[in-house]
Image (cartoon, grey):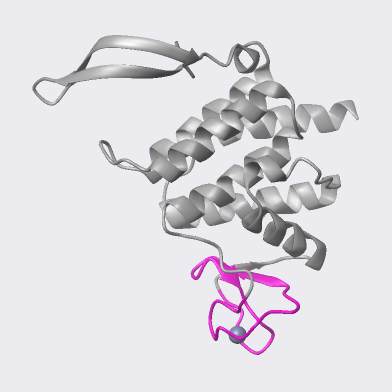
Amino acid sequence: MPLTFGEYVLFKGRGLYTISEGKIVNSFRGCLDDLEKLTYSTYLCELIDISMVDDESNAVLFKELVTSLYLLNSNALDNEILIRAFEIKLLKATGYALDLENCCKCKRRLSYCDYISLAYSGGVCNRCEKSYGIPISSSTYNILRYLNFYSLDNIYKLKINDNIKKELYSIMKSLIGSIYQRRPKSLDMLDIIKESGDKNE
Ligand SMILES: [Zn+2]
């Protein structure tokens, strides 16, 4: 079953693993019965796939993934905010943490920022050269900082308007594409869902 979180006993044969025992902890049924949640949870798994290599373990990232699936399954918060927050945690857990407190080029403290560098994964101050990056509005920048700072189970109070959501989506999409050099395919499905949602508004 897709999305099954469980405990398994594995035996390694010639390069392949065989499961000899297994116990299901949670099968996230709530995510399987809802197309948007199913797409989002598939996307989370795909992000793990593009950011890790086989047999690599990452306990921090595993915890963030399971927490996200529980939150997605429970309707505890806005799905889109949760996904953006997971993307930010993924960058952090795989060694590409966003630097949003200081300029990523000169390390000067940032009190205001309107540009995110894709090359350095962080905010650029007004004195440094703004190249290979994306402009960002100050409200979106503040949300990005908030999501970067607080843990996943602490972001449920956050409310974000649609313009900021769109800007965040496009910035995170560019960052992920630039860092991992691979683009998750389920994002295309997310775009289709979003477009049909926009048309219905
Ligand atoms: Zn600077």
Where's the C terminus, which quadrant? top right
**Residue farthest to the bottom?**
127
Residue lying at 59% horizontally and 33% vertically, measured from the top left: 68
The foreground one among 40 and 178 is: 40
Q: Position of residue 193 (x, y in %)?
A: 71, 27
Q: Is residue 41 above or below residue 129?
A: above
Q: Is residue 80 above or below residue 173?
A: above
Q: Is residue 127 left or right of residue 117?
A: right
**Residue farthest to the right?**
201
Magenta: main secondary structure: loop
Magenta residues?
A: 102-131
Q: Is residue 141 visible?
A: yes
Where's the N terminus, which quadrant? top left
Q: Position of residue 5 (x, y in %)?
A: 46, 20
Q: Is residue 6 above or below residue 70?
A: above
Q: Position of residue 167 (x, y in %)?
A: 74, 53
**Res. 99 image quadrant:** bottom right
**Res. 143 image quadrant:** bottom right
Q: Is residue 108 left or right of residue 90?
A: right
Residue lying at 46% horizontally and 33% vertically, measured from the top left: 46
Q: Magenta stretch containing residue 61, yes or no?
A: no
